[in-house]
Image (tube, helix red, strand yellow):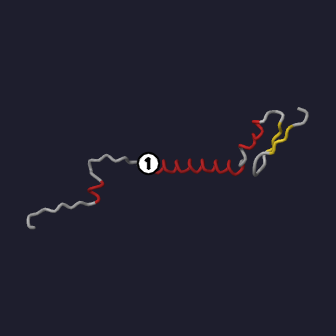
Amino acid sequence: MAGVEVAVISAVTVCYHPGMKWLQWTPDRNGIVGLALVLILIVSVFAFLVTYFPDFQQRRAGAGFGPDWECTAQPKGDPVCIRKPGR
């Protein structure tokens, strides 16, 4: 075995080659803080809307029946619709 060269393959050599062009995203600290604040703002607005307006789509419950129906949205379940008398 004298004079025989053994090639050593390491994980670094296999996964990374200095000639490769890797995509790198290196934002500055201000960019990260700004992005975090924007994300916190979006999540808080969404949480506010979901908390205070949970039945947003049910407010237009009687839109498909016509003018001779009166529909009342219920907190849980389907809307209750009553046909107006005299029409």
Q: Is residue 18 left or right of residue 63?
A: left
Q: Residue at x 41, y 49 (%)?
A: 26
Q: Nearer the viewer, residue 37 or 18?
A: 18
In the image, residue 37 lies at what x, y percent? Answer: 56, 50
Q: Quadrant of residue 14?
A: bottom left
Q: Residue at x 60, y 50 (%)?
A: 43
**Residue 33 image offset from top left, x and y in percent:** 51, 51
Q: Residues within 10 Å of mark 1 (few under 14, many from 20)?
A: few
Q: Is residue 54 left or right of residue 40?
A: right
Instruction: Looking at this view, name the residue that lies furthest to the left.
Output: 3
Residue most extreme to the right? 86
Q: Position of residue 24 (x, y in %)?
A: 38, 48
Is the C terminus in the top left, top right, bottom left or bottom right quadrant? top right
- What is the secondary structure assignment of the residue under circle 1? loop
Query: In terms of depth relative to the viewer, which is nearer, 38 or 72?
Result: 72
Q: Is residue 18 left or right of residue 64?
A: left
Q: Quadrant of the N terminus?
A: bottom left
Residue 59, quarter of picture: top right
Outermost bottom residue? 1
Q: Is residue 60 shown above or below 54?
A: above
Q: What's under tag 1, amino acid-wise?
A: Pro
Q: Residue at x 82, y 33 (%)?
A: 67
Task: Decide which of 19, 63 is in the foreground and name it.
Answer: 63
Label total for image: 1
Look at mark 1 in the image and give the residue it sits on: 27
